[in-house]
């Protein structure tokens, strides 16, 4: 039983490795582009609201705490507590997505979508290219991350359903543990995304 | 002396054990607190300008936060070390990717005086660029590289094939 638990954990970690590499290439691409258009990136990142970004960071960190407590409660057969912690985690995730929605709609309204949709600066402006590239990375990276949050909400809801049914206890809580790992890696990626996009640019 | 030392050590160990697996609430709360404080520090630091160190500070703080999440929330602290190795090797390989990309880009920047157009086919600067490279390669003169800003910037690649014995990096200032 312990061996099965370890094996499934190892499998999850291998999946998480692919996630880190997936985001990692984007980070490397962002870094290299930042080296090529430093002024443009600095100018562009001022469009991001660091208060909203910081708020979302706090929300995600808190949700990581509630998630680890859900795992902890499940491992001690505390069904009620697990349910409560899972619900708080899901609410945090939804709050994150709502804030993201407002950020996105504001930026789309300003004409900050990348590529041909970038209308904030005239295409003849020498700064336009670098600004557009910044928002290409911004929407790609936060969009992919947002998708992971959304997927997390779906999985957490399934987990909640099973927990309510009483499927998990101290002897078997592998799914709770694995979803916890996934949730923490999504948080971990945001830990890097937030300063690099919102604070440094 | 020996006995007391052993005793205190044993006690400490025992205390740790009593805390750890059964009630993690306090420990997790402390980790959350540390993460929030670090977030405040990184946001606060972003209002100050440390120049090139900005990004180093941000990445360092982010890495401390990520380590806290991995060690405590993801249980790597007490987990099978193989899992930690997977995580660390991911970061090592990403570092390798970044290093080789930077090496590539840096040696390409050599070709353009502004450093803004690493890849060719960006128009006018090519005139000055061609002259620089043809001048620098066949007849390297001591001190030439240092008097011209563009040449000095890219001496990593243009200076390499020059014959040995030439004082390439003679400080001109």
Image: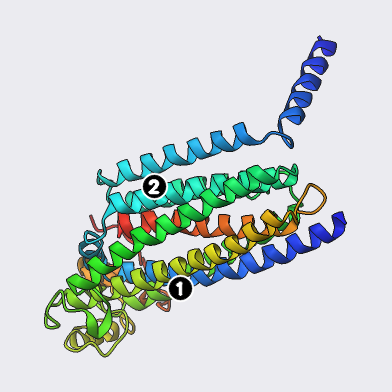
- Front position in the image: B17 or B145: B17
User: Circle 1 is placed at which residue position?
Assistant: B101
Q: Which mark is residue A117?
A: none
- Front position in the image: A23 or B32: B32
- Secondary structure found at label 2: helix
Q: Is residue B42 visible?
A: yes
User: Circle 2 is placed at which residue position?
Assistant: B57
- Distance (Cα) linking label 1 and label 2: 22 Å
Q: Can you say whether B2 is above or below A122 in the image?
A: above
Q: Residue at x 58, y 61 (%)?
A: A157
Locate residue B31: give its quadrant. Answer: top right
Instruction: Check chain identity for marks 1 and 2: say if they share one.
Output: yes
Where residue B17 sits in the image (x, y, percent)? 76, 30
Q: Can you say whether A50 is above or below B18 in the image?
A: below
Query: Furthest-front residue in view?
Result: A165
Classed neighbour count for the residue bearing mark 1: other residues with Cα under 10 Å, few (<14), some (14–19), many (≥20): some
Of circles 1 and 2, which is in front? 2
């Amino acid at each position: 039983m312990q061996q099965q638990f370890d094996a499934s954990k190892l499998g999850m970690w291998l999946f998480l490795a692919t996630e880190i590499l997936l985001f990692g290439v984007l980070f490397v691409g962002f870094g290299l582009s930042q080296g090529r258009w430093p002024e443009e990136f600095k100018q562009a990142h001022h469009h991001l609201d660091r208060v909203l970004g910081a708020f979302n960071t706090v929300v995600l960190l808190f949700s990581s705490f509630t998630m680890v407590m859900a795992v902890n409660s499940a491992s001690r057969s505390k069904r009620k507590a697990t349910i409560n912690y899972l619900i708080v985690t899901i609410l945090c995730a939804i709050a994150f997505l709502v804030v993201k929605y407002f950020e996105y709609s504001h930026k789309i309204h300003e004409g900050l979508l990348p590529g041909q949709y970038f209308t904030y600066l005239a295409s003849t402006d020498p700064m336009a290219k670098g600004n557009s590239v910044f928002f290409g990375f911004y929407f790609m990276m936060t969009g992919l991350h947002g998708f992971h949050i959304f997927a997390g909400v779906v999985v957490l809801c399934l987990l909640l359903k099973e927990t309510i049914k009483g499927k998990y206890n101290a002897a078997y809580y592998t799914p709770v543990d694995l979803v916890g790992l996934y949730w923490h890696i999504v948080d971990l990626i945001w830990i890097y995304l937030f300063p690099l996009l919102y604070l440094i640019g | 002396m020996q006995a007391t030392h052993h005793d205190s050590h044993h006690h400490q160990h025992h205390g740790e054990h009593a805390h750890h697996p059964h009630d993690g609430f306090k420990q997790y709360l402390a980790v959350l607190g540390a993460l929030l404080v670090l977030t405040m520090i990184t946001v606060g630091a972003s209002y100050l300008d440390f120049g090139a160190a900005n990004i180093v500070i941000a990445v360092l703080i982010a890495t401390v936060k990520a380590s806290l999440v991995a060690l405590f929330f993801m249980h790597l602290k007490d987990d099978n070390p193989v899992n930690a190795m997977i995580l660390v090797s991911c970061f090592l390989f990403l570092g390798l990717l970044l290093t080789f990309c930077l090496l590539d880009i840096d040696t390409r920047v050599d070709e353009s005086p502004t450093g803004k157009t690493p890849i060719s086919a960006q128009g006018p600067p090519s005139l000055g660029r061609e002259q620089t490279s043809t001048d620098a390669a066949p007849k390297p003169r001591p001190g030439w590289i240092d008097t011209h800003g563009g040449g000095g910037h890219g001496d990593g690649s243009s200076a390499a094939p020059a014959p040995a014995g030439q004082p390439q990096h003679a400080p001109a200032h």
